[in-house]
Image: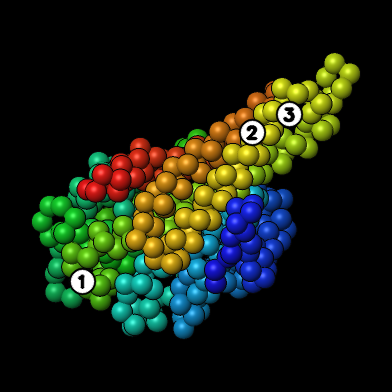
Amino acid sequence: MDAAVDAGTGQFELTEEQRAIQEMAQAFAADRVAPNALDWDRAKHFPADVIRETGPLGLGGIYVKDDVGGSALGRLDAVLIFEALAHADPAFSSFISIHNMAASMIDRFGSDEQRQRFLPKLTSMEWLASYCLTEPGSGSDAAALKTRAVKSGGDYVLNGAKQFISGAGDSDLYVVMARTGGDGPKGISALVVPKDAPGLSFGANEDKMGWHMQSTRQVIFEDCKVPAENLLASEGAGFGIAMAGLDGGRLNIAACSLGGAQSALDKALAYTAERKAFGSKINQFQALQFRLADMETELQAARIFLYAAASKLDRKAPDAGKWSAMAKRFVTDIGFDVANEALQLHGGYGYLHDYGIEKLVRDLRVHQILEGTNEIMRVIIARALIGR
């Protein structure tokens, strides 16, 4: 389903179905997420019950094929959903994105038997999924990962650890990149590891700056046995599987930044329309009006850029990877800057938890790091430009 672009305004004209998808996500977010977001953040509570409520809405397998319960939607449709959810809580939206990335890897690269075994419970959100690539010693240099999987009879035996894993300890399945061969990307394979696999354990929940409603732990493998039938595709295919998931993941996390930043701007507009100083509402001061104007302009530019990148990925355009990297870099930087500016416009109140702005600043800051740091995005863009 493709959105049209108005040549005069540059605005994306969404189809009726896309607007319905967007409105459904907005309504759910406003009803079930927004009223609870600050409490979840304060209590560092993982709201598995509310996350599972997104399954019947089709959000457990947004771009998974429909024969296993997926919604079979496009990447622009997904961006609209994650933007809408993030307006209520970027951390909630980001976890739904991670679950969908893991599910889509099984859908795209799994055998029919694996798809039928795993995906109906993932698309319904009966099971939650996490994605395990990063390690304590390999973040941006993902091809240097050390976690090893050795074939032993009908199993793979895993040893190693993954770092910064969202949902670790709460998710039911883990799509794990492990080394089955030699050094470099060609030695990496992808395995689906169930939570009850013998030898699988989890570290302590990390004490993070933001994303407090998500559990973030190490995933630890100590002679962890996984059936060989859980190998996705073939040995050595894992790095390609991981990279294939990242283009869409980068768009999703950009959408989470966009939704969170829009929420920050909306809060700033409401606050500056009420707050008075020197006998006037502060939104009557031209210097402040200029700042609001810049925030709106930057968010609209980011939105058009992101939708264009998602449309390229839907069309499988040759430069879709470059556009995904550019959108991730640009939108997450703009998203953080707008949220930070909104905090400044709130003055001292912006620093208080109950106003919700400081949470947005904390949550959006990590988006410039994960799914590939914004410095790595620049490397990808530069390589595309110079032909490497």
- Residue beneath the point at 49% across and 61% down: 311
Write down the residue under mark 2.
Answer: 294
Q: Which of disc 1 and disc 2 is earlier in sequence?
A: 1
Vertical comparison of 224 with 160: above or below: below
Question: Alpha carbon of mark 1 to alpha carbon of mark 3: how far?
Answer: 57 Å
Q: Residue furthest right?
A: 279
| Residue 337, image x, y percentages | 56, 33
| Residue 5, image x, y percentages | 58, 60
| Residue 356, image x, y percentages | 67, 38
The amino acid marked with disc number 2 is Asp
Vertical comparison of 119 with 81: above or below: below
Vertical comparison of 349 with 212: above or below: above
Contact between marks 1 and 3 (CB within 8 A): the answer is no
The amino acid marked with disc number 3 is Gln
Residue 234's mark? 1
- Residue beneath the point at 55% across and 40% down: 335
Write down the residue under mark 3.
Answer: 289
Q: Which of disc 3 and disc 2 is earlier in sequence?
A: 3
Nearer to me, 25 or 217: 25
Residue 56's mark? none
The amino acid marked with disc number 1 is Ser
Mark nearest the camera among 1 and 3 is 3
Q: Quadrant of the N terminus?
A: bottom right
Instruction: Give the secondary structure at mark 1.
Output: loop
Residue 316, quarter of picture: bottom left
Whether residue 279 sits left or right of residue 20 in the image: it is: right
Mark nearest the camera among 2 and 1 is 2
- Residue beneath the point at 61% across and 45% down: 300
The local crowd at label 3, few if under 14, some if 14 to 19, many if 20 or more residues have their Cα within 10 Å, is some
